[in-house]
Image: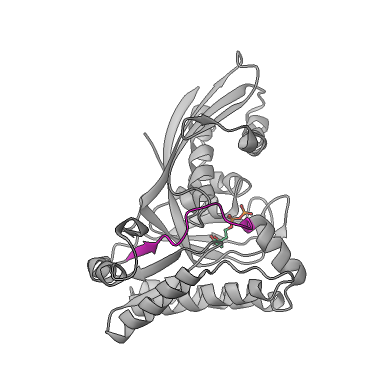
């Protein structure tokens, strides 16, 4: 009862921010993301009736701080299978952990799929996405490659993700790592605080749903200019909403603004470049993959080589 899976990170073009149901992790709005090829997690799980306790290793180091999250998540599947076997989980992140680069997304997607395989549960990806969601919301989108929609739904079964487009066109991202340290406020806490205290939050879910509809048309037309515009506007609306929380949640740093200024300069030079940001200071530039090196050259005037990562579209989570 052993399996190893690689799952790729995703970056939302239409953001998920706020839960309607904290226990089931049902969001207040649907979201849509692009899976990335350069960032992923590989996770190996082994169940045995002979193990006396669960164990979790992250990047080769025993991680007791995260163990309860891993155990609780695994319990969902143990319950489904009707077993009580303990598990050993070994996970390696090829993502700067907790830097707003969706490490929890690739992590729970890899873990969920590895459990599905090792326990012979035979859940389809759609069914699996409803369980993975309970590990981390954004993880539900990391089961698939390409462009993925997580439909809000209103129950455990209906809040799930599907791929809506393989993204077989000239699209990529240039990620500017402004700061790879652990984020100050987790997205979980940040969204809770925003829902509870931001006077702008009531406008967020309907704005996000409107943006999602526009985004799906832009994707159908493979219109990168529109995709970038809608994504940038959606990200800024999310950040504005959280900045209005009390206390305020500000993920942007000086270097984030510096990267944003460079994006504006690139646009003035006629290059399609739009940014998005998550629960951290890093800036992700949506662009034509074929123009990523031009964008990188511009960024290199003010950032170091190690701070810039060019990535294309990532594949489905898969058994390795
Ligand atoms: C800003 O999925 O990390 O990246 O469900 O509480 O684990 P939990 O939150 P998480 O939130 C991601 C928020 C975001 C936007 C997005 O990825 O859609």
Locate residue 58, reporting x and y percent. Answer: 51, 35
Judging depth in this view, the residue of 265 and 116 nearest the camera is 265
Is residue 38 found left or right of 281 in the rendered image?
left
Residue at the spot x=77%, y=67% of the render? 196
Residue at the spot x=67%, y=26% of the render? 82
Is residue 51 found left or right of 301 in the rendered image?
right
Q: Is residue 126 in view from this perspective? A: no
Q: How is the image coloured?
A: one colour
Name the image quarter holding residue 76. top right
Residue at the spot x=42%, y=66% of the render? 284
Name the image quarter holding residue 84. top right
Q: As displayed, is residue 90 above or below residue 30?
A: above
Q: What span is in magenta?
A: 172-187
Locate residue 143, reporting x and y percent. Answer: 47, 48
Location of ligand 1 given as a quarter of the image: bottom right
Locate residue 11, reporting x and y percent. Answer: 46, 60
Q: Residue furthest top?
A: 50
Helix, strand or loop for the magenta stretch, by majority: loop
Residue 177 part of the magenta segment:
yes
Residue 290 part of the magenta segment:
no
For the C terminus, the quadrant is: top left
Residue at the spot x=52%, y=34% of the render? 116
Judging depth in this view, the residue of 81 and 183 nearest the camera is 183
Q: Residue furthest bottom?
A: 268
Is residue 317 found left or right of 206 in the rendered image?
left
Name the image quarter holding residue 167. bottom left
Q: As displayed, is residue 226 above or below residue 320?
A: below
Q: How many marks?
A: 0
């Amino acid at each position: 009862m052993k399996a190893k899976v690689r799952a790729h990170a995703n970056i939302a073009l239409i953001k998920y921010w706020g839960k309607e149901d904290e226990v089931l992790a049902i969001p207040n709005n649907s979201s849509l993301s692009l899976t990335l090829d350069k960032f992923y997690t590989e996770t190996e799980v082994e169940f045995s009736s002979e193990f006396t306790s669960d164990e979790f290793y992250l990047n080769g180091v025993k991680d007791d701080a995260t163990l309860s999250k891993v155990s609780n998540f695994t319990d969902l599947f143990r319950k489904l299978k009707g077993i009580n076997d303990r598990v050993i989980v070994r996970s390696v992140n090829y993502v700067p952990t907790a830097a707003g680069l969706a490490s929890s997304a690739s992590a729970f997607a890899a873990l969920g799929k590895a459990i599905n395989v090792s326990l012979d549960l035979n859940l389809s990806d759609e069914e699996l996405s409803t369980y993975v969601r309970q590990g981390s919301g954004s993880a539900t989108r990391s089961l698939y490659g390409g462009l993925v929609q997580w439909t809000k739904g209103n129950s455990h079964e209906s809040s799930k993700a599907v791929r809506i487009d393989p993204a077989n066109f000239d699209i990529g991202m240039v990620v500017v790592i402004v700061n790879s340290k652990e984020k100050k406020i987790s997205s979980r806490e940040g969204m809770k605080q925003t829902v509870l205290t931001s006077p702008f939050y009531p406008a967020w879910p309907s704005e996000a749903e409107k943006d999602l509809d526009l985004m799906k048309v832009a994707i159908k037309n493979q219109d990168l200019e529109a995709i970038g515009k809608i994504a940038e506007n959606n990200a800024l609306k999310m950040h504005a909403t959280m900045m209005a929380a009390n206390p305020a949640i500000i993920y942007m740093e000086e270097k984030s603004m510096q990267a944003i200024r460079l994006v504006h300069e690139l646009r003035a030079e006629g290059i399609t470049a739009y940014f998005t940001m998550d629960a951290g200071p890093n800036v992700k530039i949506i662009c034509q993959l074929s123009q990523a090196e031009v964008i990188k050259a511009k960024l290199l005037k003010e950032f170091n080589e190690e701070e810039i990562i060019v990535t294309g579209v990532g594949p489905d989570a898969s058994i390795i």
